[in-house]
Amino acid sequence: MASLLGIVFPVTFPGQGQLHSRRRSVVKSSSSSDERQTLFNRIAPVYDNLNDLLSLGQHRIWKNMAVSWSGLDKIQSLSFVFKNLCFLMLGLVYVEVRARTGDKVLDLCCGSGDLAFLLSEKVGPSGKVMGLDFSSEQLAVAASRQKLRVRSCYKCIEWIEGDATDLPFDDCEFDAITMGYGLRNVVDRDRAMREVYRVLKPGSSRVSILDFNKSNQSVTTFMQDWMIDNVVVPVATLYDLAKEYEYLKYSINGYLTGEELEALASEAGFSSARHYEISGGFMGNLVAVR
């Protein structure tokens, strides 16, 4: 997501390798992006704990799903069928894994690194994971978490502070991209989606975008708003973060529906796009194929 001045500033964290300078053109920042950057910097120290508490740990299931790549059009094994049945019993959709050993992948708007760590387990030590975010505080948390992990695959992750609308990468560089709870907070979503398309390799490479679902169902919308007002914000108040989490409801209301997200991906050039409603319609996952 956007850096403070709309410029990509590579960041080096203690114990991590030196990051290469990869600046692209300067993008004028907006007050909205600066405010959102300040918000995420502020919540960074308690972000993971609040995610676990407020979702009862379910966010880990949703993020595992986001790391899974292809659609449900090809059932390739009994294992695939079994996993689908298990996920459907939970009201979820299972998508077969696409990230492979040795792949180079990007976790966009990576936050404290949950999806990047999952991706590193898929690509292994011979692969490469780039985690990009506009919040230096979130990246510092991600880097500190990385140092506590001993498996060799976690050493393949590199953290970069940067702008989701002006990615510091070459064309056709990545085999797959994830974005968890990020697109909703990007001011220029059209440009961000075009950038995702640009840096993905041609062929069957995919982006998987997980976020809150903006439902067309009034009951789902009512329950979503009620949970935020009566559970999320009161819990955040205990951490002196009520104002920051009140923003959540307004950001969901200003987000795109599943159909609008599919249209956004198609307009960016993706050959196909499908949005899955998960967890009773409270969450959604867009899978788009380049």
Image (spheres, helix red, strand yellow):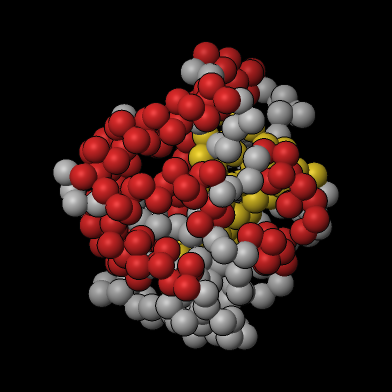
Tally the numbered discs. 0
Question: Where in the figure is residue 17, as x and y percent of width and height?
Answer: 36, 76
Question: Where in the figure is residue 118, as x and y percent of width and height?
Answer: 44, 46
Left or right: residue 192 versus residue 57 is: right
Left or right: residue 131 versus residue 188 is: left
Tell me which residue sits at (60%, 32%) in the image.
215
Tell me which residue sits at (56%, 54%) in the image.
183
Using the image as rendered, state which of residue 104 and residue 290 is in the foreground.
Answer: 290
Q: Is residue 13 visible?
A: yes
Q: Is residue 67 visible?
A: no
Is 3 drawn above or below residue 90 in the view shown?
A: below
Using the image as rendered, state which of residue 266 and residue 196 is in the foreground.
Answer: 266
Using the image as rendered, state which of residue 238 and residue 10 is in the foreground.
Answer: 238
Question: Where in the figure is residue 217, as x and y percent of width and height?
Answer: 61, 25
Left or right: residue 5 versus residue 275 is: left
Question: Where in the figure is residue 244, as x and y percent of width and height?
Answer: 32, 53
Tell me which residue sits at (58%, 48%) in the image.
255
Q: Quadrant of residue 40?
A: bottom left
Using the image as rendered, state which of residue 256 and residue 158 is in the foreground.
Answer: 256
Is 11 drawn above or below residue 129 in the view shown?
A: below
Left or right: residue 240 versus residue 232 is: left
Tell me which residue sits at (76%, 29%) in the image.
74
Q: Quadrant of residue 135?
A: bottom left
